[in-house]
Amino acid sequence: MGESRITGTSGRAIPVRGDDIDTDRIIPARFLRCVSFDGLGEHAFEDDRKNFSDGKHPFDRAEFQGASILVVNGNFGCGSSREHAPQSLMRWGIKGFIGVSFAEIFFGNCVANGLPCLTLEAAEVEEIQALVESDPGCLLELDVSERRVRVGEKTYSAGLRDGVQRAFLEGLWDSITLLLADAGDIDRVAARLLPLKERP
Amino acid sequence: MGKNLLQKVWDQHTVRELPTGQTQLFIGLHLIHEVTSPQAFEDLRGRGLGVRVPSRTFATVDHIVPTHSQERPFVDTLAEEMMVAIETNCGEFGISLFGLDDDRQGIVHVVGPEQGLTQPGMTIACGDSHTSTHGAFGSIAFGIGTSQVRDVLVSQCLAMDQLKVRRIDVTGELAPGVYAKDVILAIIRELGVKGGTGYAYEYGGEAISSMGMEERMSICNMSIEGGARVGYVNPDETTFSYIRGRPFSPGDDEWDEAVKYWNSIASDDDAEFDDEVSFDGAAIGPNVTWGINPGQSVQVDGRLPKVDELPQGERESVREALDFMEFEQGVSIAGTGIDVAFIGSCTNGRISDLREAAKVALGRRVSPGVKALVVPGSRLVGEQAESEGLHEVFLQAGFEWRKAGCSMCLAMNPDKLQGREISASSSNRNFKGRQGSPVGRTLLMSPAMVAAAAIAGEVVDVREMMGG
Ligand code: SF4
């Protein structure tokens, strides 16, 4: 792997509003009792959907089925490191994110799975969320090469760190090939560290 | 200008700069547990790859293990399947496992330091966000996802973005009844749950340097709750004497050299930081969370916020939290009734935590109707507590005394809140649904405050039970 370049994604969007949405809410802990990520898609946001939304959670609404771009607010994916969170969203059908900010471990997990997370100003995100809510059929384009989000006629310039952009564009986001490129260097670093061994 | 610890450890572990601009960082210690590792091993098998440095990965089981009876096979067949998976994976790939048949089993962030695996100047990674705990020893320790667990297994390295460093000084002396947990809750309340994004937190100052290792671990543990993936304290004599003699610590003939190295990686006196903040430790009181993230807390003698008095941008999340908790705005937190009391977790499940809680429980009774449990962070913590008779203190007071595991910190085992129950908890997260019931409610506080709440049946100021 490592050869698949990601320049962006496009499709219909689904808004999930709120700051600090943590990974326990994205995928509750009881669904972590598994040895494979398969089947997590149907449980995305399960407790929010069942307990706090009267069936009106965006993930349950007919007009958002088939959407592939998740539009969120600040500090999305905070909390636990569980990769089950982006995995469940990915398996539900999400291919990319737009948000005000993302928690670091969540962001890294998304990169490792080839899911771009682009950032916009808070007001811009809210504008897009409102637009998508009133017109769920509208198409969004998430452009990694130009760091842009396009919604209909309107274009927003978006944030994405240089290194991450490069990893997507050059197909380096699946890091194994990169990390094993020069194994001799790894051994040289290992050799200068204190050894880790049990006392006799 | 001198360097800070993060920069030194980073340089020491840099394999090379990657074409993406990231650093390829060598990982000195990799810890794994049953929840976030099985998919990584599956991936290795799929690619026909092996584990590069098996001697630098250690495994334990903690998240799903029952704390009542640990008899196999588990009643929960999914949990049993995960146990079998980690046993098989460790066996097949040559990794040491502190399993249920091993005295060293326990919560991953309790076990690493306890065994002397966690040492200053190391890079430490684990598929768990509270890996920041290990920073208490002056290591750079951070949580990773499963794909990165796979990367470490395969290459003993990670592709990482460099972090900025914020120095957090806690000056002065903490008042009696005020603990590390209260300090970190105050820090998160002030700097916010995302204030640490992009930063490592370096904790220092008189209040931190006079703490023992276990308290420093509680502080570093919750760095991630403030958005900081890494939190650390510079190593000192307290650190070295904690490590000395532990099973994986350097031997006597290597000791002086190790200490020399450990001293050398501490932040220089004139080290540069990207940001610096200071807290008056003497002004911090016992803290309690009232909301649905660890930043939403007040001092036990304080009141919940009034929505109208807050800046516009904060109102919505405060309203959401108050609605979920079913708390009135502006009321005092003391006097809030509780149903469950939980003492344990990688934040506060160590021997010093149990000692402090036992002091409060001694000679008192848990309030009727409160379910109270004490879950040691590791089997060795449990044995130590039993040798000191702490379990008797708890049992006589009406607490349940359990076996080691994560338990009600995230309720992946049978220990769960029911319905709308409110729990006083020494753990680290009060997210909606965190303790097993989707609508359950959590109040975070120090272990001594949890013990006090268990006895009073409601949130109380532990200082009132401490004899003046
Ligand atoms: S005790 Fe809680 S926070 Fe710590 S490792 Fe276990 S589940 Fe995670």
Image: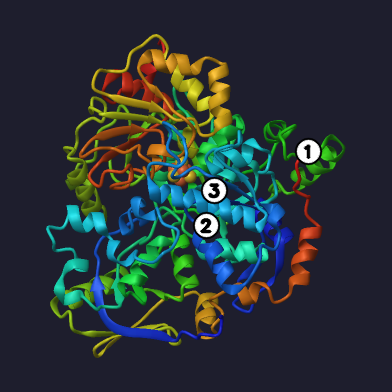
- In percent of width and height, residue B434 lies at 33, 45
Residue B302 occupies quadrant = top left
Q: Is the C terminus of chain B in the top left, top right, bottom left or bottom right quadrant? A: top left
Marks 2 and 1 share the same chain: no
Using the numbered discs, state the Cα–Cα distance from disc 2 to disc 1 in whole angstroms. 27 Å
Using the numbered discs, state the Cα–Cα distance from disc 2 to disc 3 in whole angstroms. 18 Å
**Kind of residue indicated by mark 1:** Arg
Q: Nearer the viewer, mark 3 or mark 1?
A: 1
- In percent of width and height, residue A133 lies at 16, 74
Using the numbered discs, state the Cα–Cα distance from disc 3 to disc 1 in whole angstroms. 26 Å
Chain under numbered label 3? B
**Which residue does the image show at 59% across and 73% down from the upper left?**
B47
Residue A52 occupies quadrant = bottom left
Res B132 label: 3
**Kind of residue indicated by mark 3:** Ser
**Which residue does the image show at 37% across and 84% down from the upper left?**
A9
Q: Residue furthest bottom?
A: A153
The residue nearer to you, when weighing B411 against B311, is: B411
The residue nearer to you, when weighing B357 against A176, is: A176
The residue nearer to you, when weighing B181 against A115, is: A115
**Which residue does the image show at 81% across and 59% down from the upper left?**
A191
Q: Is the N terminus of chain B in the top left, top right, bottom left or bottom right quadrant? A: bottom right
Res A199 label: 1
Query: Which residue carries the number 2 mark?
Result: B37
**Kind of residue indicated by mark 2:** Ser
Q: Nearer the viewer, mark 2 or mark 3?
A: 2
Q: How is the image coloured?
A: rainbow
Chain under numbered label 1? A
**Residue A129: in sight, yes or no?**
yes
